[in-house]
Structure formats: C-alpha cells, structure tokens
C-alpha cells in the first residue's frame, strides 16, 4: 500500500493499493479470462475451458514470478516501440500507422481497465 498526498480532497493523504479479485491481479485476470472465453466460444466444455485457462494462468504466473505488477503493460509497450524502429515498418507508412494505431488502442484498453501504460502503476482514479 502506498500513501499519496493531494490537495484535491479534504483528507490530503489517502492510501492506495492494487485491486485484486480473489488474490489475482487485474492483469492476471486478463490472462485467465481471455483463453477461457476463446476456448468456450470454440465449443469446448465450460469445465475443460476453465481447467485449461487455469493451467495457462498458472504457467503465466510461474513465468513472471519475479516481475512487478504492470509487467505485461510495459512488455507490450516495449515491443510496440521496437516494432516502430524496424526498418521495413519505418519505410512502409501504412504499416507504421497500423503499429502506432495498435499501440494507441492497447493504451486505451489498459487505461480503461485500470492498468495505466506508465511506470507509475497507479489506478485510473489517481490520474
């Protein structure tokens, strides 16, 4: 938990902590729900979809065990930045616009879900 100081509210100091659902961070919840929804829409049984999604989440959590929260946001932003620097993409304006647009869309998705694409890892309400 972190203390933030502000002059916008009467208390001037308020505590913030990352929101978790059943001990799973919002970023990890995306890793759980996306495969589950995809597998279920492909016609797999709901329990099998849940089991496979939990296995994927467990694998993801083991692979990113020493990473800070917000790791996925930073990883994605870094890779979009690397794509912008690829010579072929730089020389092809439609691809460059596509990569920049993809970055902008993903930033809006992260912000709307409360995962800001910045090193601060603050909630969207603190902006």
Image (cartoon, helix red, strand yellow):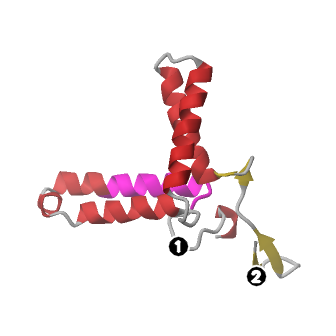
Occupied quadrant, residue 2:
bottom right
Q: Position of residue 113 (x, y in %)?
A: 60, 52
Q: What kind of secondary structure does the magenta stretch mostly adopt?
A: helix
Image position of 2 (left or right of 94): right
Task: Name the residue: 57% across, 44% down.
Answer: 58
Task: Name the residue: 38% across, 57% down.
Answer: 103
Q: Which residue is mark 1?
A: 119
Q: Position of residue 73 (x, y in %)?
A: 48, 60
Q: Position of residue 45 (x, y in %)?
A: 57, 17
**Can residue 31 be seen in the rendering of this structure?**
no
Task: Name the residue: 88% across, 79% down.
Answer: 11
Q: Does the stretch in magenta take in 30?
A: no
Q: Position of residue 67 (x, y in %)?
A: 53, 65
Image position of 37 (left or right of 13): left
Q: Which residues are magenta?
A: 100-115
Q: Which of labels 2 and 1 is toward the front?
A: 1
Task: Name the residue: 51% across, 49% down.
Answer: 60
Q: Which residue is mark 2?
A: 6
């Amino acid at each position: 938990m972190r203390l933030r100081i502000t002059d916008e509210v009467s208390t001037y100091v308020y505590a913030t902590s990352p929101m978790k659902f059943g001990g799973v961070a919002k970023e990890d919840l995306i890793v759980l729900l996306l495969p589950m929804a995809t597998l279920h829409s492909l016609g797999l049984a709901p329990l099998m979809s849940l089991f496979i999604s939990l296995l994927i989440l467990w694998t993801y959590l083991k692979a990113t065990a020493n990473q800070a929260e917000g790791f996925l946001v930073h990883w994605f932003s870094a890779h979009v930045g690397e794509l912008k620097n690829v010579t072929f993409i730089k020389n092809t304006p439609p691809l460059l616009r596509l990569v920049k647009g993809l970055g902008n869309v993903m930033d809006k998705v992260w912000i709307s879900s409360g995962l800001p694409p910045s090193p601060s890892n603050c909630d969207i309400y603190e902006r």
